[in-house]
Image: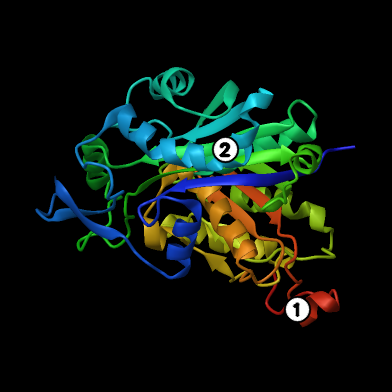
Amino acid sequence: MSARVGIIGLGARTPVGVKAPHAAAAVRAGICRYGNHPFMIDKQGHPMKVARDGLLPPELGGSKRFQALASSALEESLSPLASQASAGWALPAVVALPDSRPGLPGALADALTHWLREDASLPIRLAQLEWLPHGHAAGLMALERGWQLIQSGRAELCLAGGIDSYLEAETLEWLDERELLKSSANRSGFIPGEGAGFCLLASARVIRQLGLSPLAWIVSAATRREEHPFGTQGINVGRGLSEAIAGATRVLGDPPTQLADTMYCDLNGEPHRSEEFTYASLRCQLAFADHTDYETPSDCWGDVGAATGPLLACLATASGRRRYARGPRPLLWASSYGGERSAVLLHLENIAEREMPAWARSRSTPPGHP
């Protein structure tokens, strides 16, 4: 029998908050940290708009910036095990990183591995490190990987996370040259951000042993691939994202006997992302209480790339802890430029079921469904 997998620890560092509860509260309040970069100028001659961690020096770059972003988020996520350090816990870690792009520090995974093993002051030893350099979807892929490791019995604890920063000068210039940088002259770009997020996963047995209550349970996860992602030949009609969402929500039944609730996603203002989601939402709407109920935190903290997945989990679990969730089953999803599409379905305890729409109660097809 597969083990239940819960999230027992969270850590976050974002431009709107350097702790998971602070970041979630800021996003809920709609606080936005967009601002002018201190010294980077776009090709129109204006300061570049970014979402920057205001506690880090703007000139700090390379792997050192990734380490600075990750350090406090790692410590926060592992805090449930801090009192257990003498027990000799050793756990695997799966961490998302950006996919290849100009300005990305060379041998980033190697530098971070050395830092985690030699220099980072962690209460728990990381026995195994796996890096997923796949960008936006990689953080949810890390959650899926940790869920699978625990479900299969190969681990009882796992750390899943992601780290990213677009604020390297060469990266910003590359975004500007490709017209991906949002500005007064380019409304179709996005605001580059940075951040780190980590989720500590545990089996139900370990959760009981530690005397903890899970922040959320991972119900299911799925990763698929889009054949025609942005920048490639062919027409993207959202099949990869549709299949990822359908894979994650298949546990709800066919037709679903329960429905997924609020979606937390990586929409960032780029038209191709919105168009892809439109196709996917039309295909998958039968699985949702309301397929228009979704949250886009990049409106507050910018595009956080590979850190997206665990940071979305921070928002979803906060809605359960603070009792403002609209239903017990939030869905997280994200899409990478390389074609990866990933979705994770959570379950929040002690959150009431939202009222099912009439079409779902009668198991009929909703109006306008193709």
Q: Residue 104 shows which numbered tag? A: none
Report which residue position mark 2 lands on: 78
Reply above or below: 89 against 290: above
Q: In this view, does 232 lie to the left or right of 223?
A: left
Residue that appears at 35% across and 53% down: 15
SS category of the residue bearing label 2? loop
**Nearest to the observer: residue 200 or residue 361:** 200
**Nearest to the observer: residue 135 or residue 128:** 128
What x and y, as percent, mark residue 42? Answer: 16, 50
Tags 1 and 2 touching, CB below 8 Å: no
What x and y, as percent, mark residue 84? Answer: 65, 32
Report which residue position mark 1 lands on: 355
Foreground mark, 1 or 2, reads: 2
Reply above or below: 222 against 71: below
What x and y, as percent, mark residue 252? Answer: 80, 58
Reply above or below: 146 against 264: above
